[in-house]
């Protein structure tokens, strides 16, 4: 029986040495790692002194001399530096963790890998998953995380058409933009109006495409139908044709005076049904523009749901239905009690992403009627949703970048919060643990 | 008994009637706008709106004009370059990441998976100003590589999630037994698992390829010179100007852009069902 643990290395000492990266590794007799970590540390320190500290300084002041200091570039460089520091901090913690872990291995096994070859082999095995995901993370850092960080910072500045660098400086203004959305009456009115239409749009358009998708899948799935293949091809067309083409075509088709709907379809319907529907002002009446948008999105989006639900339907075991028929269930009961729950259970996560997609569905709003007709103030048209309003705020003749950034942050927050609750409720992560 | 059978026959008849009525009506609603757009490509250039017209004179002038008097061939070439580059890069990155999340258990795995899901909800718009300034700093305005990177990066989170779901459907026993036989990390990935996910690779490639063809926003925002535009931005010019609309040119260009994508789409659509139901859902 051993009373004294075999203490070859002191774990705390190893961690302490690693406060300067590399030293802990030398202490653990891993010179290769030590040199590597120390080199990274020195490189970072040099970068920090030469470029990093000035960059952070400029980031805090956002420049002091107009025409010399370009506030926007300073903001961007500061953001890049912050990402770099974050990456280094992660490395730093990892370095301390590594020193402590290897010291513990020394104590446990009485030895540890000290040769470069063994260390590399070990790193290849343990680091393989990280190695494979590095490209994804690098790309996402530059394309998603960095820009979102910049937007986050912009929301707390006064960057607008009065403050266009390099002629004017941008300044930090705290949460003024967020307050303005609610306190400035013009913004508040526009924000409320645009937000309520965005919510109606998201609910109606997405529910429309889901209902039509499920309905079509159930109808086509009936065994007696002839020409299934042909119908399938037709129903997939709205998905296969690039959306911008169909939206631009619909924009022409729904034209008030010359469009096919008013000039051809409605007269034909009147002729067939002996009704007397007048031409509808699709592009000039906000109400009808909204109706048209919802119809078009239903048309565009249902094939995706249809394909997915068809897959689910084909995987529902037939004996479920047989048992239901023996119990005397009718068509509606079978659908309500078996089919629908199965579909919703299997597809809930995708259905949620459909809602978030439409919440941010810029192209249909912009390309169909440019957010019009008319205006609801602060640059927004009557069919603008939040995302297209933001686009107009940033690209219009008098851009309001900071305001746009503040609104962007708010809607991103709403979307993420709502979808996280929905994901939790539908238990989309449920199976994750057991896998 | 006879009455019951008659009743059954009766409901069966109406069920079929309504089923086919629904299918035909839906087909008409889908085909009508597509057909009137497509047919306009073959009509004389004096029309201003897409309509069904059986008496019109058919012509190929629009296509001729498209290739001789507009920059359409340039736009097409640009879009192809961007689409192919996006496809290659995105498929490689997403496959590697999806495989890792499906097969390896490592620190931070679960949190980063949730992070992927959250990050894909942030609208592209959130980054627009930053993209613009970044492009300015890197002198990348009006270049393809920058646009390609944006497409690739934007597609990673959602598609990694889908790809991981598909990898999960490949039984782990397969790679574990290969491991026992002495196969290394790369070998298991390359020779055992990858061949089994080919259907999903095809779907991923198609979607990544379709992205640049369908995107209007980023291309419009970052490309400046007329010769450098993509098909979407270029074609929009034909139809956006109310005083001199060239809708027949738009239609001709639209057909040429949509046709190859549609063909690829229907060629691969069998794979969608398995890809979507296993990747997009739980299980």
Image (cartoon, rainbow, N blue to C red):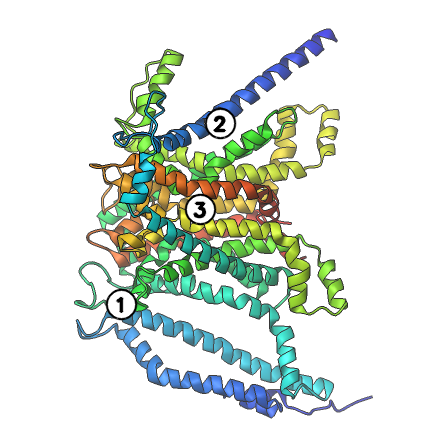
Nearest to N terminus: mark 1 or mark 3:
1
Is residue A79 rendered to the left or right of residue B261?
left
Q: Position of residue B222 (x, y in %)?
A: 31, 57
Q: Position of residue B88 (x, y in %)?
A: 50, 58
The structure residue drawn at horizontal position 47% and vertical position 77%, both measured from the top left corner, is A89
Look at mark 1 in the image and give the residue it sits on: A72
Asked if A206 appears above or below B125 in the picture, the reply is above
The structure residue drawn at horizontal position 57% and vertical position 54%, both measured from the top left corner, is B163
Instruction: Give me the disc on residue A357.
Output: 3
Is residue A44 rendered to the left or right of residue B116?
left
Rendering quarter of residue A108: bottom right
**Element class at badge 2:** helix
Disc 3 from disc 2: Cα separation: 25 Å
In which chain is the residue bearing label 2? B
Look at mark 2 in the image and give the residue it sits on: B27
**Neighbourhood count class around disc 1 (C-alpha, 10 Å): few under 14, some 14–19, many 20 upward:** many
Disc 1 from disc 2: Cα separation: 52 Å
């Amino acid at each position: 029986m051993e009373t004294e643990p075999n203490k070859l290395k002191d774990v705390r000492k190893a961690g302490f040495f690693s406060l300067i990266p590399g030293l802990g590794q030398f202490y653990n007799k891993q010179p290769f790692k030590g040199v590597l970590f120390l080199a990274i540390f020195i490189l970072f320190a040099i970068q920090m002194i030469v470029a990093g500290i000035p960059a952070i300084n400029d980031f805090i002041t956002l420049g002091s001399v107009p025409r010399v200091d370009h506030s926007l570039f300073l903001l961007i460089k500061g953001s890049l530096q912050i990402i770099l520091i974050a990456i280094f901090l992660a490395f730093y913690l990892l370095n301390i963790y590594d020193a402590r872990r290897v010291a513990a291995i020394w104590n446990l096994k009485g030895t540890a890998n000290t040769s470069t070859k063994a260390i590399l082999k070990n790193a290849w095995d343990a680091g393989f998953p990280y190695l494979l995901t590095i490209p994804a993370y690098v790309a996402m850092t530059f394309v998603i995380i960095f820009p979102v960080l910049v937007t986050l910072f912009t929301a707390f500045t006064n960057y607008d058409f009065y403050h266009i660098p390099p002629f004017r400086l941008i300044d930090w203004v705290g949460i003024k933009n967020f307050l303005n959305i609610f306190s400035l009456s013009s913004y508040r009115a526009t924000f409320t109006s645009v937000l309520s239409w965005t919510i109606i749009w998201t609910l109606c358009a997405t529910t429309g495409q889901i209902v039509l998708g499920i309905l079509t899948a159930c109808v086509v799935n009936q065994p007696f139908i002839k020409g299934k293949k042909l119908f399938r091809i037709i129903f997939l067309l709205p998905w296969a044709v690039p959306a911008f083409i169909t939206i631009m075509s619909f924009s022409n088709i729904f034209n008030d005076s010359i469009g096919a709907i008013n000039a051809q379809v409605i007269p034909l319907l009147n002729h067939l049904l002996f009704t007397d529907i007048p031409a509808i002002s699709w592009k000039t009446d906000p109400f009808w523009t909204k109706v048209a948008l919802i119809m078009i999105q239903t048309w565009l989006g249902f094939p995706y749901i249809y394909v997915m639900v068809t897959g689910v339907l084909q995987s529902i075991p037939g004996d479920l239905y047989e048992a239901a028929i023996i119990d005397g269930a009718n068509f509606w009961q079978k659908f309500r009690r078996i089919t629908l729950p199965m579909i919703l259970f299997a597809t809930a996560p995708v259905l949620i992403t459909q809602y978030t997609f439409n919440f941010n569905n810029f192209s249909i709003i912009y390309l169909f009627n440019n957010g019009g007709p008319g205006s609801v103030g602060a640059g927004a048209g009557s069919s603008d949703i939040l995302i297209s309003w933001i686009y107009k705020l940033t690209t219009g003749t008098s851009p309001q970048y900071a305001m746009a950034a503040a609104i962007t942050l708010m809607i991103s927050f709403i979307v993420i919060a709502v979808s996280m609750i929905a994901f939790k409720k539908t238990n989309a992560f449920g199976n994750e643990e057991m896998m | 008994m006879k009455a019951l059978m008659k009743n059954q026959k009766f409901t069966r008849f109406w069920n079929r009637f309504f089923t086919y009525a629904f299918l035909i009506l839906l087909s008409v609603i889908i085909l009508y706008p597509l057909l009137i757009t497509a047919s306009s490509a073959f009509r004389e250039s004096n029309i201003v709106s897409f309509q069904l017209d059986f008496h019109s004179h058919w012509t190929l002038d629009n296509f001729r004009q498209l290739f001789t008097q507009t920059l359409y061939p340039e736009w097409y070439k640009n879009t192809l370059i961007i689409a192919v580059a996006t496809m290659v890069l995105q498929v490689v990155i997403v496959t590697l990441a999806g495989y890792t999340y499906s097969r390896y258990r490592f620190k931070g795995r679960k949190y980063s998976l949730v992070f992927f899901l959250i990050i894909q909800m942030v609208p592209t718009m959130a980054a627009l100003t930053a993209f613009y300034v970044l492009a300015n700093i890197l002198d990348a305005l009006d270049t393809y590589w920058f646009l390609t990177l944006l497409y690739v990066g934007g597609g990673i989170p959602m598609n990694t999630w889908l790809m991981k779901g598909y990898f999960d459907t490949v039984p782990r026993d397969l790679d574990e037994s290969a491991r026992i036989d002495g196969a290394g990390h790369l070998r298991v990935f390359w020779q055992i698992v990858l061949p089994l996910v080919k259907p999903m690779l095809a779907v991923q490639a198609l979607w990544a390829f379709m992205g640049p063809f369908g995107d209007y926003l980023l291309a419009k925002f970052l490309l400046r010179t007329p010769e450098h535009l993509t098909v979407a931005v270029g074609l929009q010019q034909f139809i956006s100007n109310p005083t001199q609309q060239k809708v027949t040119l738009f239609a001709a260009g639209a057909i040429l852009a949509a046709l190859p994508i549609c063909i690829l789409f229907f060629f691969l659509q069998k794979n969608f069902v398995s890809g979507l139901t296993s990747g997009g859902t739980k299980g």
